[in-house]
Image: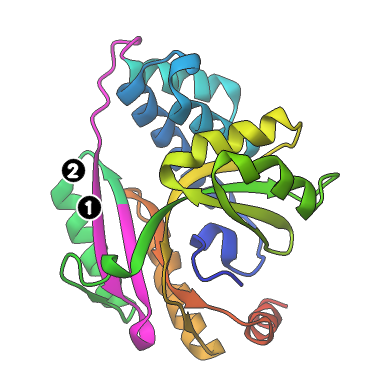
C-alpha cells in the first residue's frame, strides 16, 4: 500500500455509516466554499474550484449542496465564510509521522481538539518543521481503473509535467509537482480519461514499514482525528505491506 496516501484512500474496506458520510460531505463542502472564496464562482477562472466540485460530485454530494456552497464561498448568498488553514505535526505509534491539516473558523478549538485526540490515542505532538521536512507538496490525480490502461494514462500526461503513474490496485495515481496539477488533469480530460479527484497532497520522502499491531494503533489515531470537524486531511509516512494488509482485512471479517 502507498504510504503517502490519505487515510480515506488507504484503510481496509469497511461499511460507511451515515455519520461518516455526513462528515465526508461536510469536508468536501468546506473545500468548495474556500475555493470559491479564494478564486470566485467562475469555473473558467478557478481551477481549484473545478477540482473541489469534481471530487464532491464523485463522492455523490448533491448538486444543490454544491451550488449553495459555491454561492456561500463567493459571497453571493450574503453568508460569510472565513476559514483558516492550520497544519499540526506529530507522531503516532513507533515514530510514524503524521501531518494534520485543519480548516477551521476557530483556531483555539481546533488546537485543543487535535492535541487531546492525539494524546488519548497514543500519539505525541511535534514541533513545527520536525515532521514537515520529510514531506513534499505534490499534485495527485486519482484515475479509476476502467477502459484506460496504465500506458494510456502515462501517454496522456507525460508531456503535461507528470512525474509517474502508480498502480494502486483499484486505481491509478498520477503524481506531478504541485504547480503541474491542473495541466496534468487537463491532459487526462483532453485524452478522454475520467478522473475521480485532483488534489495537492503532502507526500513523504521516506516511509516506515509497519507491522499489523503498529498499523492498528496508527489507524486508530487517524480514525479518531478524522472524526474531528476541523480536520480536513491527514498525511502520514506509514507503509503497509500486502501481508499486513491481508491481516488487517481479516480483522474486519
Q: Residue at x 68, y 81 (%)?
A: 242
Q: Which residues are magenta?
A: 75-101
The reply to whether residue 196 is visible in this rendering is no
Find residue 203 and report its image quarter: bottom left
Q: Quadrant of the C terminus?
A: bottom right
Residue 201 screen position, x and y as percent? 43, 52
Q: Is residue 96 above or below residue 146?
A: below
Graded by Cα atoms within 10 Å as few (under 14), some (14 to 19) or many (20 or more), the crowding at tag 1 reads some
Question: How many numbered tags mark residues here?
Answer: 2
Name the residue at the right extreme. Answer: 147
Residue 23 screen position, x and y as percent? 47, 46
Decide which of 204, 70 is in the foreground and name it. 204
Tell whether position 23 is magenta.
no
Q: Spatial distance from mark 2 to mark 1, Cα to Cα? A: 6 Å
Residue 137 screen position, x and y as percent? 38, 54
Decide which of 19, 96 is in the foreground and name it. 96
Decide which of 203, 233 is in the foreground and name it. 203
Instruction: Please tell me whether mark 1 sits on a helix, a strand or a loop.
Output: helix
Q: Residue at x 30, y 14 (%)?
A: 75
Tell whether position 77 is magenta.
yes
Q: Is residue 32 above or below residue 5?
A: above
Label 2: which residue? 106
Graded by Cα atoms within 10 Å as few (under 14), some (14 to 19) or many (20 or more), the crowding at tag 2 reads few
- The label on residue 110 is 1
Specify whether 167 is left or right of 146.
left
Specify whether 139 is left or right of 251.
left
Q: Residue at x 58, y 42 (%)?
A: 197
Amino acid at each position: 500500500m502507498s504510504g503517502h496516501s490519505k487515510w480515506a484512500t488507504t484503510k481496509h474496506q469497511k461499511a460507511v455509516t451515515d455519520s461518516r458520510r455526513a462528515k465526508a460531505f461536510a469536508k468536501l463542502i468546506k473545500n468548495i466554499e474556500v475555493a470559491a472564496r479564494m478564486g470566485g464562482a467562475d469555473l473558467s477562472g478557478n481551477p481549484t474550484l473545478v477540482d473541489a466540485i469534481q471530487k464532491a460530485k464523485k463522492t455523490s454530494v448533491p448538486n444543490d449542496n454544491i451550488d449553495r456552497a459555491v454561492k456561500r464561498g463567493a459571497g453571493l448568498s450574503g453568508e460569510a465564510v472565513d476559514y483558516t488553514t492550520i497544519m499540526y505535526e506529530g507522531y503516532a505509534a513507533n515514530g510514524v509521522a503524521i501531518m494534520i491539516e485543519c480548516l477551521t473558523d476557530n483556531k483555539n478549538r481546533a488546537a485543543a481538539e487535535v492535541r487531546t485526540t492525539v494524546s488519548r490515542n497514543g500519539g505525541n505532538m511535534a514541533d513545527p518543521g520536525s515532521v514537515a521536512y520529510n514531506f513534499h507538496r505534490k499534485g495527485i490525480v486519482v484515475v479509476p481503473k476502467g477502459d484506460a490502461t496504465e500506458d494510456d494514462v502515462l501517454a496522456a500526461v507525460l508531456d503535461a509535467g507528470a512525474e509517474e503513474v502508480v498502480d494502486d490496485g483499484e486505481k491509478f495515481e498520477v503524481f506531478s509537482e504541485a504547480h503541474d496539477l491542473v495541466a496534468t488533469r487537463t491532459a487526462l480530460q483532453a485524452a478522454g480519461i475520467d478522473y475521480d479527484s485532483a488534489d495537492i497532497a503532502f507526500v513523504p520522502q521516506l516511509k516506515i514499514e509497519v507491522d499489523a499491531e503498529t498499523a492498528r494503533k496508527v489507524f486508530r489515531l487517524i480514525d479518531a482525528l478524522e472524526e474531528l470537524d476541523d480536520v480536513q486531511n491527514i498525511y502520514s509516512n506509514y507503509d503497509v505491506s500486502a501481508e499486513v494488509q491481508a491481516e488487517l482485512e481479516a480483522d474486519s471479517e
